[in-house]
Image (cartoon, rainbow, N blue to C red):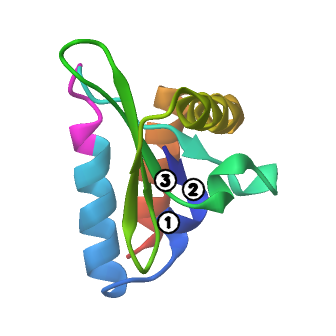
């Protein structure tokens, strides 16, 4: 899941932005990759609190990873995992569908000419 601002923030110049976004759109055609963009019209949502990852171990236990500029933090307490899962569902509920997201990525890529 990506915030739309990531697609529009100029990093590396127009050529780099266009190539990176087209590569992202191409990767998203693979069956195991799903990209969802939170459109800028959403406003405030749980994903603005910072990046996080939810991982599932081979024994089906869940772990979370929270990241900030100083350090990362692994969490595994049930209450913490529940909070991260709730944030995940909140963010996912605000996103465009996979194909709407890919269309937006391609559209923004073309604007970087």
Q: Is residue 6 above or below residue 100?
A: below
Q: CA distance from mark 3 to mark 1?
A: 14 Å
Q: Is residue 91 above or below residue 105?
A: above
What percent of the width, then of the height, locates residue 110?
41, 62
Residue 106's disc is none
Res 109 → quadrant: bottom left
The secondary structure making up most of the magenta span is loop
The residue under label 1 is 6
Q: CA distance from mark 3 to mark 2?
A: 15 Å
The residue under label 3 is 107
Q: Quadrant of the C terminus?
A: bottom left
Q: Is residue 109 above or below residue 69?
A: above
Q: Which residues are magenta?
A: 26-31
Element type at mark 1: helix
Outermost residue toward the top in this view? 59
Look at discs 3 and 1 and give the one toward the viewer: 1
Element type at mark 2: strand
Q: Earlier in the sequence, mark 3 or mark 2?
A: 2
Q: Is residue 106 above or below residue 81?
A: below
What percent of the width, then of the height, locates residue 65?
39, 48
């Amino acid at each position: 899941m990506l915030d739309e601002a990531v697609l529009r923030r100029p990093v590396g110049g127009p050529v780099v932005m266009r190539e990176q976004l087209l590569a992202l759109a191409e990767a998203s055609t693979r069956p195991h990759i799903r990209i969802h963009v939170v459109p800028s019209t959403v406003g405030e949502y749980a994903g603005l609190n910072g990046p996080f990852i939810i991982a599932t171990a081979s024994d089906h236990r869940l772990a979370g990873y929270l990241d900030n500029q100083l350090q990362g933090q692994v969490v595994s307490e049930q209450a913490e995992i529940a909070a991260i899962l709730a944030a995940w569902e909140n963010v996912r509920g605000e996103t465009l569908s996979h194909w709407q997201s890919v269309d937006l990525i391609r559209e923004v890529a073309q604007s970087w000419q």
